[in-house]
C-alpha cells in the first residue's frame, strides 16, 4: 500500500496524539456527535436488528460466491457500455487509471471521496509516476482541505476533523484560495465552492469511489452529501469508478437494506443528500453525462481474506465509520496514529491483512477488546474475534517474512506464559511462587524482565500474609 | 495470465477452503414502515422528511399555481438566468417567466454554471425518506438539478411511492443500461469544518419541491 504514512510508528503516534489538546477536543466532539446521532436514528427504527442480520447474510452470500458475482457484474456492466478493468494490486490500478486518463487526453482530473483510491496512493502516483499527468483535485470539502495541507484523512466520514477553522483559514490564505482569512465557516465553504467550480468546469476526467455495486444490473452506486460526486460523475466526459472486489451486492433490490443502514450508521442521517446509481455511460449522444464509464475492480490483498471464515468477515465492511466513533482507543488517539488510511477497529483488522502482518503488527493489539465495535457494526462483523485471530497469527510468526524480528519478544513472552501456566497448575508451586513474589515486593524488586509489560500497568501491592495462610490459621 | 483470470483464480482458490456457512433462520424480509399504505400519509411523510433536512415543499393544486409560485421565487431571488430541463411539464412552468433568461439544459457549460435557478420535474418521490427520484433517460435533469444554487422540482403527488424498496423496484423496470438514477434528499450539505452544518457546498443550497396535488 503506497501512499501511506510510515507503518509501525503506532506507539509514538499514539503517545503524541494523547498530548495534543486540540486533537483531543476535536475527537471528543466528533465521536460524541456521530455516535449520538447514530443512536437517535436507530432508536427510531424498530426493525434495526433484523436489517443488520439481513445485511450480514447478503454480504456472506456475495463473498461465498464472489467469483460468480464478479463475472456477472462485469458482464452486465460491459453490456451497459461500461469498460471493466481488473487490478491485482494498487500499482496496477494506478497504472490503469493513468492509462485511461492518457487515452482520453485527460489533462484535468477531479475526484470525489474514495477510501480505495487513498489505499492505492492514486494521487501521489498521478503526480509523480505518471510524469505528464496531473494530480487529481480532491473535491469533497474535507478531502480538499487535507490535500491542500499535504496530509491524510483522520476519519472515514470526516477527513479533516483534526483541523480547526482557524487552521483552515490560514491554510486557505497560504494556498491562495482567499486573500484574507476569517474563521467564518460559511465563508470558507463558499470560497471552496468558488475555487472547485472552476476545476469542475474544466475537468476531462472524473474519478469516484463506489459504495455498492450490483451484480444483477452492472450498476455502481455513489453516496454523498455535498454534490461533488454528482459533479465528478456528470460533468467530465470520462468517469472512472474505483472499487474493491468486495463491494458487490447480488440484486438491485438489496440496495434497500444497505441504503437504510449506511447513512444511519455513519452520520445518523435517514439518507444522505444524494445517491447516484450509474449503469454505463449515456446511450444517446445528446444525453447528459460522460461518454465513457470505466470501472476498476481492485484485489490488492482482498482475495486472500476469503481463505478463512474469520478473516472473510473483513470484506463485509461498508466503511460507515461507526466502529471508530464507538472505540475508546480511537476516541483518544484519532485516525493518524494508526498510520494507515483505514483507522479505528476496522483499520486495525484490515490494515495488517492488506499491508502484511509484519508492517502493522502493533495494530491488532491497539484494542481493549471491549466489543463496542462489534455492537455497532451494521453488518455484524465480529471485530474482537478478528483482532484475537490476528494477534495469534502475529505471535506464532505465521505469514511473517521477518518472523525472527517479531518473535524475539514473542519468544520470551511465550516462555513467561508457559512458566506461569506451569506454576498455576500445582498448589505447591503456586504457593512457593507467591511467597517469593511477596518477599521480592517487600524488598522493592519488581518482576524481572517485564518492564515493557508493566509500563502501562500498576502492580497491586501484595498483602503481608496470603488469604490462604490466614484461613488456615483461623481456628488456632 | 491476465489480471482478470488471475484475480478470479485467487478468489476461487481461497473460497475452496471454507465450507459455506449455514444460512441463518431469519431470511424474512426486514420490516418496512407499515403505515405508508395510505397515499395521503405518503404525501405527509414525504413532506415531513424532506423538510427535516432543509428542503422546502409547496403544495400546488394546478400547473397554473405552480407557475405563479415559481415566478414569485425567481423574483424574490432576483435571478437573471434560469436553466430548465427538457421535460414538457418543466417547460410549461417557465413558459411565461419574465425578467429572467431561460436556458435549455443543452446550453454551453459555462452558461449553465452561472445559472441561479434550475427547474426540473421528478419521476418519483419516496415517502419513507422524503426523496426525489430523477431518471436520466426520461429527462435531461442531471445538470439543471445540480449546478444552480436553487433547484425547483415539480412532483406529481400521485408519483410518491411509500418506501425505498418500492422506488428501487420502480426504477428497475427492465434494463438499467445507460440510465443514471439520482436520488435527491434535500439541499447539498457539508459538516467537514468543525462539524458545522453548511448548506450549498457544491450542489444547490435550496431545494424547492412544488408538489402537484390536484383535487
Image (cartoon, helix red, strand yellow):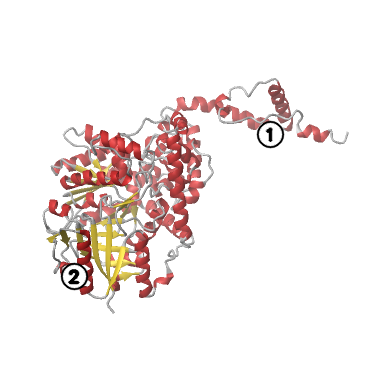
Residue on which disc 1 sits: A425
Q: Quadrant of residue B143?
A: bottom left
Judge from the rendering whether residue A408 lies leftward or rightward of residue A435; answer left or right. Answer: left
Name the one closer to the observer, A393 or A147.
A147
Judge by depth and name the residue closer to the eye, A266 or A259.
A266
Badge 1 vs badge 2, beta-carbon distance below 8 Å: no
Question: What's the mark number on residue B20?
Answer: none
Query: Which quadrant of the figure has residue A350?
Result: top left
* Marking on residue B89: 2
In the picture, measured across the screen, residue B145 lies left or right of residue A311, that is left
Residue beneath the point at 44% across and 57% down = A41
Residue A435 image position (x, y, % from top left): 73, 26
Asked if residue B27 lies left or right of residue A446, the reply is left
The local secondary structure at tag 1 comes to loop
Parent chain of label 2 = B
CA gap between label 1 and label 2 equals: 84 Å
Residue A40 horizontal/vertical position (percent): 46, 56
In this rendering, the answer to whether A465 lies above or below B3 is above
| Residues tagged by mark 1 and mark 2 found on one chain of the structure | no
Work out which quarter of the rendered image holds the C terminus of chain B and state it.
bottom left
Considering only vertical position in the picture, is A191 above or below A415?
below
Q: Is residue A406 above or below residue A342?
A: above
Residue in the picture at 30% in, 50% down: A210
Q: Please tell me which residue is depicted at 24% across the width and 60% down the height of the picture.
A: B151
User: Compared to A44, does A24 lie above or below?
Assistant: above
Quarter of the image for residue A277 reads bottom left
How many badges with numbers are in the image?
Answer: 2
Q: Position of residue A65 (x, y in %)?
A: 36, 53
Q: Nearer the viewer, mark 1 or mark 2?
A: 2
- For the question of whether residue A314 can be seen, the reply is yes
Q: Which residue occupies the foreground of this view, B180 or A83? A: B180
Amino acid at each position: 500500500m503506497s501512499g501511506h504514512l510510515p507503518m509501525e510508528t503506532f506507539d509514538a503516534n499514539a503517545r503524541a496524539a494523547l498530548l495534543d489538546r486540540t486533537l483531543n477536543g476535536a475527537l471528543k466532539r466528533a465521536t460524541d456527535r456521530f455516535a449520538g446521532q447514530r443512536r437517535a436514528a436507530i432508536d427510531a427504527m424498530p426493525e434495526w436488528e433484523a436489517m443488520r442480520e439481513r445485511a450480514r447474510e447478503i454480504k456472506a452470500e456475495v463473498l461465498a460466491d464472489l467469483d460468480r458475482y464478479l463475472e456477472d457484474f462485469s458482464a452486465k456492466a460491459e453490456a451497459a457500455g461500461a469498460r471493466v478493468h481488473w487490478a491485482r494490486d494498487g500499482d496496477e490500478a494506478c497504472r490503469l487509471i493513468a492509462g485511461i486518463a492518457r487515452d482520453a487526453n485527460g489533462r484535468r482530473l477531479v475526484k470525489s471521496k474514495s477510501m480505495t483510491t487513498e489505499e492505492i496512493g492514486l494521487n501521489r502516483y498521478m503526480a509523480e509516476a505518471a510524469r505528464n499527468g496531473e494530480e487529481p483535485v480532491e473535491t469533497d470539502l474535507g478531502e480538499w482541505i487535507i490535500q491542500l495541507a499535504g496530509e491524510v484523512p483522520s476519519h472515514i466520514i470526516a477527513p479533516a476533523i483534526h483541523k480547526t477553522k482557524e487552521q483552515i483559514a490560514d491554510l486557505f490564505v497560504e494556498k491562495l484560495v482567499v486573500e484574507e482569512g476569517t474563521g467564518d465557516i460559511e465563508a470558507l465553504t463558499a470560497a471552496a465552492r468558488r475555487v472547485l467550480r472552476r476545476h469542475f468546469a474544466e475537468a476531462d476526467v472524473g474519478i469516484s469511489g463506489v459504495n455498492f455495486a450490483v451484480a444483477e444490473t452492472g450498476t455502481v452506486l455513489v453516496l454523498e452529501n455535498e454534490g461533488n460526486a454528482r459533479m465528478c460523475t456528470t460533468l467530465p466526459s470520462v468517469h472512472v469508478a474505483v472499487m474493491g472486489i468486495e463491494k458487490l451486492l447480488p440484486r438491485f433490490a438489496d440496495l434497500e437494506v444497505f441504503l437504510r443502514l449506511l447513512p444511519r450508521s455513519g452520520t445518523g442521517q435517514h439518507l444522505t443528500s444524494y445517491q447516484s446509481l450509474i449503469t454505463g455511460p449515456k446511450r444517446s449522444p445528446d444525453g447528459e453525462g460522460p461518454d465513457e464509464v470505466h470501472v476498476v475492480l481492485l484485489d490488492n490483498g482482498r482475495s486472500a481474506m476469503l481463505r478463512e471464515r474469520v478473516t472473510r468477515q473483513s470484506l463485509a465492511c461498508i466503511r460507515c465509520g461507526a466502529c471508530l466513533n464507538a472505540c475508546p482507543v480511537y476516541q483518544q488517539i484519532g485516525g493518524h496514529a494508526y498510520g494507515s488510511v483505514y483507522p479505528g477497529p476496522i483499520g486495525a483488522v484490515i490494515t495488517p491483512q492488506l499491508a502484511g502482518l509484519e508492517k502493522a503488527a502493533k495494530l491488532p493489539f491497539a484494542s481493549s477488546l471491549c466489543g463496542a465495535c462489534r455492537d455497532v457494526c451494521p453488518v455484524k462483523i465480529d471485530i474482537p474475534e478478528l483482532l484475537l485471530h490476528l494477534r495469534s497469527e502475529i505471535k506464532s510468526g505465521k505469514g511473517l517474512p521477518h518472523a525472527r524480528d517479531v518473535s524475539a519478544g514473542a519468544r520470551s513472552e511465550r516462555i513467561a506464559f508457559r512458566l506461569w501456566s506451569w506454576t498455576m497448575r500445582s498448589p505447591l508451586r503456586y504457593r512457593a511462587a507467591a511467597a517469593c513474589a511477596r518477599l521480592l515486593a517487600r524488598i522493592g524488586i519488581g518482576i524481572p524482565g517485564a518492564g515493557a509489560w508493566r509500563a502501562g500497568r500498576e502492580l497491586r501491592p501484595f498483602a503481608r500474609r496470603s488469604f490462604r495462610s490466614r484461613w488456615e490459621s483461623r481456628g488456632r | 495470465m491476465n489480471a482478470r483470470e488471475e484475480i478470479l483464480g485467487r478468489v476461487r482458490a481461497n473460497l475452496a477452503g471454507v465450507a459455506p456457512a449455514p444460512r441463518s433462520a431469519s431470511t424474512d424480509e426486514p420490516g418496512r414502515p407499515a403505515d405508508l399504505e395510505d397515499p395521503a400519509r405518503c404525501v405527509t411523510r414525504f413532506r415531513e422528511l424532506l423538510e427535516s433536512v432543509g428542503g422546502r415543499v409547496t403544495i400546488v393544486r394546478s400547473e397554473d399555481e405552480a407557475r405563479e409560485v415559481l415566478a414569485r421565487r425567481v423574483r424574490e431571488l432576483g435571478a437573471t438566468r434560469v436553466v430548465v430541463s427538457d421535460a414538457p411539464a418543466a417547460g410549461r412552468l417557465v413558459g411565461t417567466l419574465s425578467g429572467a433568461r431561460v436556458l435549455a439544459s443543452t446550453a454551453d457549460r459555462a452558461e449553465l454554471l452561472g445559472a441561479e435557478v434550475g427547474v426540473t420535474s421528478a419521476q418519483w418521490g419516496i415517502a419513507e425518506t422524503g426523496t426525489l427520484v430523477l431518471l436520466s433517460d426520461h429527462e435531461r435533469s442531471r445538470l439543471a438539478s445540480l449546478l444552480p444554487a436553487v433547484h425547483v422540482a415539480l412532483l406529481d403527488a400521485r408519483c410518491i411511492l411509500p418506501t425505498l424498496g418500492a422506488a428501487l423496484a420502480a426504477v428497475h423496470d427492465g434494463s438499467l443500461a445507460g440510465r443514471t438514477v439520482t436520488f435527491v434528499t434535500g439541499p447539498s450539505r457539508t459538516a467537514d469544518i468543525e462539524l458545522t452544518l453548511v448548506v450549498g457546498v457544491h450542489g444547490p443550497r435550496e431545494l424547492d419541491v412544488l408538489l402537484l396535488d390536484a383535487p
